[in-house]
Each structure stands twice: as C-alpha cells, then as structure tokens.
Image (cartoon, grey):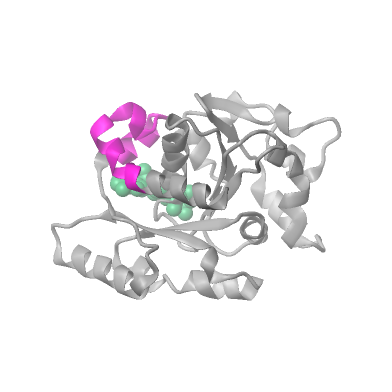
C-alpha cells in the first residue's frame, strides 16, 4: 500500500504577500526534515522555480505538457530534482491553461485527473504555489488540495482583504475549514501600525488556532530568493523563522496519516 501525499495550496487573492516565499521555504524545510516533497509552481511568473534557482532553460517539459495532455509526456518527464528530497514541477503558459479551463466542464476534478499519477510517487507533501487573484487555474488548485495555507502581509490593505478568501471558498462550494494556517508575513514589530495589524489578524481568526507566529520582514529572505537559494542555504539564523510553520505541517500530516 502506498501513502498518498497531503496537498497544500499556498494562496491569497492578494499579490505580493509572500505566497511563493512561504511555499518554497516550507517545501525546503520539510525536505530537510527528510520528507519527500513536490513543489508545484502554478503561477505564470514562475517565482517559486526562480527562488530555487531554476529558469525555464533548466527544464524541458513542464506542467503545461501534462495539463494539455501532450502525447508521450508523463509526470516523471516534467519533475525536476531541486534539492535532497525536494522536487519541482515547473510550469509554462499558465495563462493559456487558464483560458482553456473556461471550456472545461469539470474544473473540480481537472487537476486530480491530470495528476493522478502523483499519488503513487512516494511524496509525503505536495505544495502548490498559486498566483494571486481568482482564476480558473486557482479554482482547480483549490479543488485539488486538502488544505490551504494563507500568508497575509502584516499591512493595512492586506489585512483588510483577509475576508476575500472566505468569499472565494464559499463561491466554489468549499469549506473554510480547509484553511489550515494563516501566516502573518513581513511583520515589523517596531511600529505601532505593525503591532495593530498583527492584532487585527489574530482577532479576525479569534480562537481558531490557525494563526502562526509572524515571520518578520528580513532583507535576507528577499536576497536569498534573488540568488536562487532558500534561507536554509543562505542564512541559517533567518531560516529558523520558518521552523514553527514547518513543525505545524509535520503535525497536520501526522493527524491525516
Ligand atoms: N518576510 C519577508 N521579508 C522580506 N522580504 C520578503 C518576505 N516575504 C517575502 N518577501 C519578498 O517580497 C516579495 C514578494 O514575495 P513573494 O513573491 O513571495 O509574494 P507572492 O505573494 O508570491 O507574490 P505574487 O502575488 O506576485 O505571486 C519578494 O521579493 C520576496 O522576496
Ligand atoms: Mg508568487
């Protein structure tokens, strides 16, 4: 018997809040703990791939060939070995896939069907880095995963927009309990505004227990991505900021398994 991976989408309707950063770091953090992880890049900007140091010249086939059903191309032809235990499924032409999905009658089973082979590849975790905004491809991603991780930038406009994800899930007929974690990101505890916005996030989710400790704004996090490295490789001290989140993910998988 094989154990299916537990699947997480890293999503927020809002752009630039740290989705790709969080997706890459939880994926690498879990891989360092010995978990076999697939990071799926489902955003046309390819930031998750770039943050791991892969440009489109480094891969041949991508998720695109799988999603359009190109003959003779299987999942194993598209997955790139990125680090020990960490595999990357890069993407191209996501906008094109998105446009095609308007003609797809069964969005809710689309990715599950196209990627059914994943369940037998021995992954413990699949982490999907989503682009911002509502889109057909994000609808498909949210139907595909077991849980959602929501990074929220600790800043007024992002905090005000928190409710949008609930609306989105409700419109898709999905349960808001899918939100396993809310990660306040780019927190600056030195300003009153930072502290107020963090309090707002904590109050909004009240006693649900899904809000993690905040990840502070650290220049090393941005620098590491630009270098195609994670902070686990770039700055050991800063990498500890992601450990609480990784620990929670290990616990969630333990409960599911
Ligand atoms: N905690 C942090 N400290 C400093 N910089 C950060 C932090 N988190 C993210 N960043 C930087 O902020 C920028 C936006 O982050 P990221 O690309 O992860 O956001 P995103 O939500 O994926 O954006 P998009 O909506 O465009 O996909 C990047 O340059 C990233 O390096
Ligand atoms: Mg991104």
Residue at 27%, 30% in the rendered image: 236
* Residue 215 coordinates in the image, percent (x, y): 29, 50
For the N terminus, the image quarter is top right
Q: Is residue 229 magenta?
A: yes
Indicate the position of residue 184 as horizontal and vertical percent values: 33, 58
| Along the viewing direction, whichever of 216 and 34 lies nearer the viewer | 34
Q: Determine the image quadrant of residue 168.
A: bottom right
Residue bounds of the magenta highlight: 220-244
Q: Position of residue 73 (x, y in %)?
A: 79, 31
**Furthest-right residue in this view:** 71
Instruction: Give the answer, above or below, for where 104 lies relative to 75.
Output: below
Asked if residue 6 can be seen in this view, the reply is yes
Q: Is residue 23 left or right of residue 152?
A: right
Q: Quadrant of residue 104?
A: bottom right
Front one among 244 and 256: 256
Above or below 181: residue 55: above
Q: Measured from the top left, where is residue 198 in percent x and y?
A: 26, 65
State the residue at coordinates (55%, 33%).
36
Q: Quadrant of residue 134?
A: bottom right
Q: Is residue 103 above or below residue 52?
A: below
Q: Number of callouts in the render?
A: 0
> Is residue 130 at all visible to an observer of this figure?
no
Q: Is residue 103 magenta?
A: no
Pick the residue in front: 68 or 111: 111
In the picture, measured across the screen, residue 136 lies left or right of residue 131, that is right
- Magenta part, dominant SS: helix
């Amino acid at each position: 018997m094989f154990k299916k991976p537990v699947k997480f989408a890293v999503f927020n309707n809002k752009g630039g809040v740290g989705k790709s950063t969080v997706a890459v770091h939880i994926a690498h953090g879990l891989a360092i703990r010995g978990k076999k992880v697939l990071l799926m890049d489902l955003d046309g900007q390819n930031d998750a791939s770039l943050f791991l140091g892969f440009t489109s010249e480094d891969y041949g086939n991508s998720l695109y060939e799988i999603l359009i059903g190109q003959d003779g191309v299987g999942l194993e032809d598209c997955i790139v070995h990125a680090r020990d235990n960490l595999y990357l499924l890069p993407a191209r032409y996501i906008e094109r896939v998105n446009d095609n999905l308007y003609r797809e009658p069964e969005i809710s089973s689309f990715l599950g069907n196209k990627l059914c082979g994943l369940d037998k590849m021995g992954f413990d975790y699949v982490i999907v880095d989503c682009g911002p905004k509502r889109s057909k491809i994000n609808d498909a991603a949210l139907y595909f995963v077991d849980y959602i991780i929501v990074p929220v930038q600790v800043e007024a406009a992002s905090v005000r927009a928190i409710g949008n994800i609930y609306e989105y899930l409700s419109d898709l007929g999905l349960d808001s309990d899918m939100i396993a974690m809310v990660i306040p990101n780019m927190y600056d505890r030195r300003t009153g505004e930072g502290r107020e916005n963090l309090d707002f996030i904590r109050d909004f989710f009240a006693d649900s227990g899904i809000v993690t400790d905040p990840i502070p704004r650290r220049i090393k996090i941005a620098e590491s991505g630009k270098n195609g490295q994670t902070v686990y490789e770039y700055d050991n001290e800063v990498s500890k900021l992601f450990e609480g989140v990784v620990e929670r993910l290990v616990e969630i998988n333990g409960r599911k398994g």
